[in-house]
Amino acid sequence: MIFGATGDLAKRKLFPSLYRLFDKDKLGDFAVIGVARRSLTNEEFKASVAKSVHSEADVNGKKDEFVSKFYYHSHDVTDSDSYSSLNTLAEELDSRYNLNGNRVFYLAMAPEFFGTIAEHLKTDGLTDTHGFKRLVIEKPFGHDLESAKKLNSQIRTAFTEDEIYRIDHYLGKEMVQNIEVIRFANAIFEPLWNSRFISNIQITSSETLGVEERGRYYEKSGALRDMVQNHMLQMVSLLAMEPPINLTTDEVRSEKVRVFRALRPIKGNEVNDFFVRGQYGKGVITENEVPGYREEDMVDQESNTETFVAGKLLIDNFRWAGVPFYIRTGKRMEVKTTKIVVEFKDIPMDLYNRQEGSVRPNLLVIHIQPEEGITLYLNAKKAGQDMNSTPVKLSYANKGIDGLNTPEAYEKLIYDCLRGDATNFTHWDEVALSWSFVDNISEVWENEKEQNFPNYESGSMGPKASDALLEKDGFFWWPVTNLDVEKC
Ligand SMILES: NC(=O)C1=CN([C@@H]2O[C@H](COP(=O)(O)OP(=O)(O)OC[C@H]3O[C@@H](n4cnc5c(N)ncnc54)[C@H](OP(=O)(O)O)[C@@H]3O)[C@@H](O)[C@H]2O)C=CC1
Ligand SMILES: O=C1O[C@H](COP(=O)(O)O)[C@@H](O)[C@H](O)[C@H]1O
């Protein structure tokens, strides 16, 4: 059952992902009930599903069969009366499609409805099924720790922790999943993966898009809640975790949780030493003039909301003591990219570059998106008479399973949920710990209006203070466009 089946997420991500799974014969017996308020016939709903998978390839001629398995139930989720007719439809489809009572409830709706829906699913008998029941819940999971706790206790009345699949779509990205493999399947990295050999780790997730039509949501969220609390901290946890004893959901998640527990809280007066906030002003992106954040729809003209965050995180454990993890994320930046740069410490003595004085550290770059791959920057002999070194790179470009593109994050996550594998979903303990880290920062920022907003031009890499954050530690942000990394 998809709650919010006429919405943007369902049309752009969920239906196409389901179709790709169906086309690859990965769905088995299934039917989908779309739930939303507007009045639609089954046929109208099927037509909208067909439209959203229109651009997908149909080499196996299976689109019509796929669409035929969709049904619509017009229902206001705040209206207690219509859950029982939803249950009747679910039971009918269960026997028609041999579903063995297995039910996945996907909440693709505004978060204020999550708790109400979960409670009704239980009280109106939809979770009384003889098969499995699973709840997939979209972000944001609360607004702060307190609201997240409240939401969690509402959904826990109807579902156990192992039946709850909290989506963080970054965990479905191929190269985010690759972080563990790069670390734990290569003898050359794991021995070096600690404070003795790594000087710092930089994670950038920059976007060229602005806030688009989401001003109302974003005004209350900002980049800290929208990106840092979830995607950025999840990437930190994968980079910093200890090797799990095996790859089961519990073991992987408990190692990630230990990272969150070791994350040094940044509070009060420290916040502005460790974190930088920014808000975009007008500027030029791919030759087009774009407005500043305060000129966007549904945004206050005096808004104090940050559209950019850079921060320095410290993980107080044996492995990472003293190694800064720098993160930055923002909207309307120069380039759309997500990259991780692991900078290794310098060798004790540089025999080759003494005259030039240009020591180039080894770097491991994990390209998360749009290109997917890994680049390892090494030093090799510069051709010619002299014994000088020059940076060289070893690159691997991930071509995906069919050589063209990797499966969309949602496709992988939906498939994991159907298989009952929650490894790439966030456990409540991770959510709670990451909210408590972020709450300390938002508390300071909400009480202190930033006088310099807007403080970065659209099309730039954020405010100057973000560069200064690294400069005071003797580092700089490694450039994140391919071309620039090559130039360094
Ligand atoms: N869109 C995206 O790319 C992403 C979205 N998300 C999250 O996914 C969720 C959905 O987002 P999105 O699809 O963009 O939202 P939309 O506003 O596009 O869709 C909302 C859906 O909820 C339905 N709805 C609203 N009120 C009710 C109600 N009282 N009863 C029943 N149905 C209702 C709407 O249909 P109707 O009006 O017919 O009732 C519609 O189907 C949100 O939590 C969002 O944060 C997360 C990541 C990305
Ligand atoms: O969750 C979110 O992520 C997107 C960025 O996702 P990406 O896969 O394109 O990197 C961001 O635009 C959005 O504000 C946020 O809610």
Image (spheres, rainbow, N blue to C red):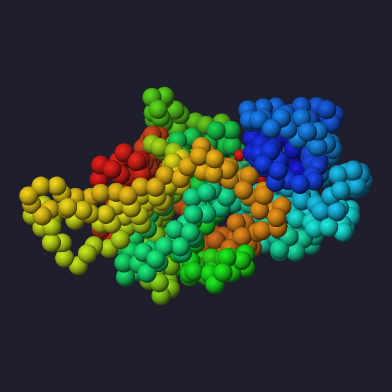
* Direction front: furthest residue: 60
Position of the C terminus by quadrant = top left
Q: Would you say 440 lies left or right of 392 here?
A: right
The quadrant of the rendered image in which ligand 1 is seen is top right
Q: Residue at x 29, y 49 (%)?
A: 393
Does residue 330 appear in the picture of this structure?
A: no
Q: Would you say 48 lies left or right of 339 here?
A: right
Q: In which quarter of the image is residue 129?
A: bottom right
Q: Which residue is drawn at 87% across and 59% down?
A: 130
Q: Residue at x 77, y 51 (%)?
A: 104
Q: In which quarter of the image is residue 387?
A: bottom left
Q: Would you say 69 lies left or right of 399 here?
A: right
Residue 20 rendering spot, x and y as whole percentages: 66, 39
Comparing 8 with 228, the one in front is 8
Position of the N terminus by quadrant = top right
**Vertical arrangement, residue 412 with respect to residue 436, above or below:** above
**Vertical arrangement, residue 48 with respect to residue 235, above or below:** above
Residue 356 rendering spot, x and y as whole percentages: 11, 52
Comparing 446 with 339, the one in front is 339
Residue 224 rendering spot, x and y as whole percentages: 50, 51
Q: Which residue is drawn at 71% across and 64% down?
A: 161
Residue 327 rendering spot, x and y as whole percentages: 42, 53
Comparing 48 with 219, the one in front is 48
